[in-house]
Image (tube, grey):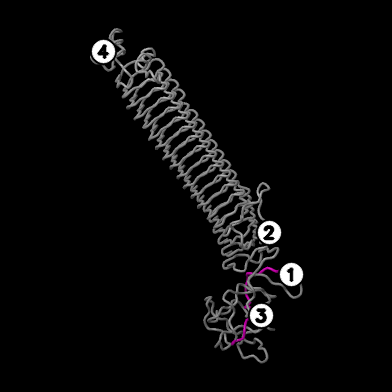
Amino acid sequence: MGCRGLVVDPYDACLAHLPEAFRATYLAGLAPDTEINHSGTTFTGDLLHRLLHALRDPNSGRPMVSHARFEAATFSGDAVFRGAKFAGSADFRRAVFAGSAGFSRAVFSRAADFGGAMFAHDARFDNAMFTDAAFVGAVFSGDAWFGAAAFSHDVHFDHAAFTEADFRGAVFSGSAGFGRTAFSGSALFDGAEFSAAANLRGAVFSGDARFGGTRFDGDARFGAATFSRSADFRRAAFSGDAWFDAVAFSGGARFSAATLAGSARFDATAFSGEAAFHRTAFSGDAVFRGAKFAGSADFSGAVFCGVATFRGAAFSGGAVFGAATFSTSASFSGTTFETVSRLGPLACQGELDLSGARFRSPVTIEAATALLSCVRTRWDSTATLLLRYATADLTDAVFEYPLSVATRPAAFTSDRHPVDESALTGLDPRARITSLSGVNAAHLSLTDVDLSGCRLTGTFHLDQLRLEGRCAFEAAPTACTGAAPFRPAGHSGAPSPRSTTGVPPRAQPAGRPRLPGRPPNSLPPSPPCTAICGNLLRTPRTSRTRQTSTTARWRCAATTATGPAPSARCSPCTGPFPATVCAPAGPWPGSLGPWPSLS
């Protein structure tokens, strides 16, 4: 195969094949800041040294080149461009560096293109200065040193292949592209600065990836990147958005003490090893929608200033949220916790949403939050909810084992340090439950909670509900303290021919005794109701707290026919007999069960 080197004008051969006399004449005619073109030429170490020596500036001692073209050139020995200054463009596309390539402290004043270049051994660009630089598709078979290099404009390493890459302390003033770049060894970016956008989408890190203390002033995009070993982002600062969607972390992922000022997205991200977000600060929204945590996930001391979303996430290992604080809301809707034994203690100024979440193992949830939603939450084992300030909704919650909900009287602590509850100061620390609708209360225990506004419609097995401590209920309406049965104004005393329950009115049995002074078919006297509407009864004899019966067959005593109607908020009342729902104002709802025999 013939020589591909560019012919040196006015000769008929490339620089490598020129006769020595012609070569010496050509080199002697060169001067600093001269434009050269030796594309396709094969350079030995000695020939390159002679060429650069001819271009050396006598004042600075550095080789100075105007435009330099070495496209598809081959450097069979070491290529030493250390300290060289390229005033014009530098073209090294598809160049082959068979030996070491040394560009340390080189200055590229205009575009430098190493696209498709092959570096068989070490390539040193440490402390080099670039304007526009391109290494698209370049292959670095040895170590690639870019430590403290400065890129004043855009730089592209897309589709490049690195063995060991060192970018520690590098400064990227323009956008930096590492899309689909492959790092087979370690990738070191500790202390690097990205002033504009950093694109590492689809990058493959087969070795350790270190971004400790790295500063990202623009958006940082790592979407669909793969980290086969550890990924270290400790103390990294993200001023723009940080996108880690669909990233695969096979080793440990460490973001401890990192700061993320913009939106942080970890949608569908897979954490196969440890995920450490200890004391990480999320100033914007933090989205972990559909993320998979196979190992332990540590969010202890993390600060979420925006909305935090873990919707549909799965925690197969431990999930630590001790002393984590959420300034707005935190959503764990549809999240699965496989082996989590403790969630919290955490503080949430807004709503802590556990709707549709599933806990497969015994768990203790400790939360100081304004709102707690446990709609359709499922506990497959025993669970304890220790709450402060919370207004909780347990509608349609499912638990097959004992579930305890209690107010924690003292502030939460984590590692002997108090959890920051300052955002909730001024609220009543007692936990409140607004709804138990659709809940099977057979395994439910409530301690020191406020049930005054609790909705019990559709609650099952209320007679087995355990109440301990001081549980507050709605005050008994005045309509429930009289002894006369309630009859709406205009009621004749005879049972209504229509019932809202769809059950036809029962006929007066023949021979039923009639009370003296009462007209036929009048209602029998109701037993006095001494309950606080909402499930507690303190009997005059024992003053013991009793639980409500759900067999509701008696109508509580109400007002006279001309008195006011009972409150519409009156929940199932209890007296010495099983209770029923107090009749609201309006049409007579009909009998709810057979009247007792007066014989």
Q: What distance separates the C-alpha of mark 1 from that of mark 4?
A: 112 Å
Amino acid at pointer 2: Pro
Q: What distance separates the C-alpha of mark 2 from that of mark 1?
A: 24 Å
Q: Nearer the viewer, residue 12 or 139?
A: 12
In this picture, residue 81 sits left or right of residue 308? left
In this picture, residue 369 sits left or right of residue 178? right
User: SS class of the residue under badge 1?
Assistant: loop
Which quadrant of the figure has residue 517? bottom right
Q: What distance separates the C-alpha of mark 2 from that of mark 3?
A: 34 Å
Badge 4 or badge 3: first in the primary sequence: 4
Which quadrant of the figure has residue 529? bottom right
- The magenta stretch spans which residues? 545-562
Q: In the image, is residue 560 part of the stretch drawn in magenta?
A: yes
User: SS class of the residue under badge 4?
Assistant: loop
Q: Is residue 437 above or below residue 382?
A: below
Q: Nearer the viewer, residue 264 or 458?
A: 264
Q: Quadrant of the C terminus?
A: bottom right
Q: Is residue 461 above or below residue 575?
A: above
Q: Which residue is mark 1?
A: 544
Q: Which residue is mark 2?
A: 409
Q: Crowdedness of circle 3 by 10 Å Cα count: few (<14), some, many (20+)?
A: some
Q: Which residue is mark 4?
A: 13
Q: Which residue is mark 3?
A: 481
